Image (cartoon, helix red, strand yellow):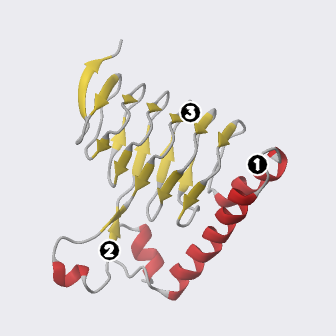
Amino acid sequence: MNEKEKMLNGEMYNPLDKDLIRDRIKCKLACQKYNNLAYDDITQRDLLIRKILCSTKEKFFIEQSFYCDYGYNIEIGENFYSNHNLVILDCAKVIFGNNVFIGPNCGFYTAVHPLDFQTRSQGLEYAKPIKVGNDVWIGGNVTVLSGVTIGNNAVIGAGAVVTKDIPDNCVAIGSPAKKVKDLT
């Protein structure tokens, strides 16, 4: 099994593998081009972001600047919107449902570095997917860590650090994020 297959299977892999480096360079150059397009060049922005991401629906908008590692692991649903400075480290799948709104300066990080310093110092890592349900609002400066699922109709308050799953129909805030209110 090659390093990319290991990465996609959630196994320990070497991110300095030449094929993974090539994939990241290709994606980061595309993100750089996207971020440097004129803000009013909506047609070119739309065409390029569709090439970067694995799967999109018809209606979505991603404000500049946007950064990701691979792009081929990101799926967004219908009526998706992200504000400025979205970062998605997509070593594993990152899937967003329909009607997801993301505030500025948010990050979704699938990569995990081993706690054991000997393994970590070898440069190895693994990744766990992130899933965001339908009708979710994520406030500004939110960090979502690997392996997390955010349920349908959830609201994540500004500045939260989401380290564990968030259930459907609730508001979660804080670091680490915790449910503070049910939504009906």
* Towards the viewer: 104 or 162: 104
Which residue is denoted by mark 3 in the rendering?
98
* Towards the viewer: 3 or 120: 120
Measure the alpha-carbon separation of dots 2 and 1.
Answer: 32 Å
Q: How packed is label 2: few (under 14 Cα within 10 Å), some, or many (20 or more)? A: some
Q: Which mark is residue 125?
A: 2
Query: Image check: 122 left or right of 109?
Result: left
Choose mark 3 or mark 1, whichever is in front.
1
Task: Identify which residue is drawn at 35% across, 42% down.
Answer: 149
Q: Are marks 3 and 1 in contact (CB under 8 Å)?
A: no
Indicate the quadrant containing the N terminus: top left, top right, bottom left or bottom right: bottom left
Number of numbered discs visible in the structure rendering = 3
- Whole-percent x, y for residue 141 in the image: 41, 42
Q: Earlier in the sequence, mark 2 or mark 1?
A: 1
For label 1, the SS is helix
What amino acid does circle 1 point to? Asp
What amino acid does circle 2 point to? Glu
Which residue is denoted by mark 1 in the rendering?
46
- Whole-percent x, y for residue 45 in the image: 76, 51
* Towards the viewer: 26 or 56: 26
Task: Identify which residue is drawn at 39% across, 42% down.
Answer: 142
Task: Identify which residue is drawn at 15% across, 76% down.
Answer: 116
The image quarter in which residue 123 lies = bottom left
Query: Image check: 92 left or right of 73?
Result: left
Q: Earlier in the sequence, mark 3 or mark 1?
A: 1
Measure the alpha-carbon separation of dots 3 and 1.
Answer: 18 Å
Choose mark 2 or mark 3, whichever is in front.
2
For label 2, the SS is loop
For label 3, the SS is loop
What amino acid does circle 3 point to? Asn
- Would you place residue 111 above or below residue 153 in this image? below
Measure the alpha-carbon separation of dots 2 and 3.
Answer: 30 Å
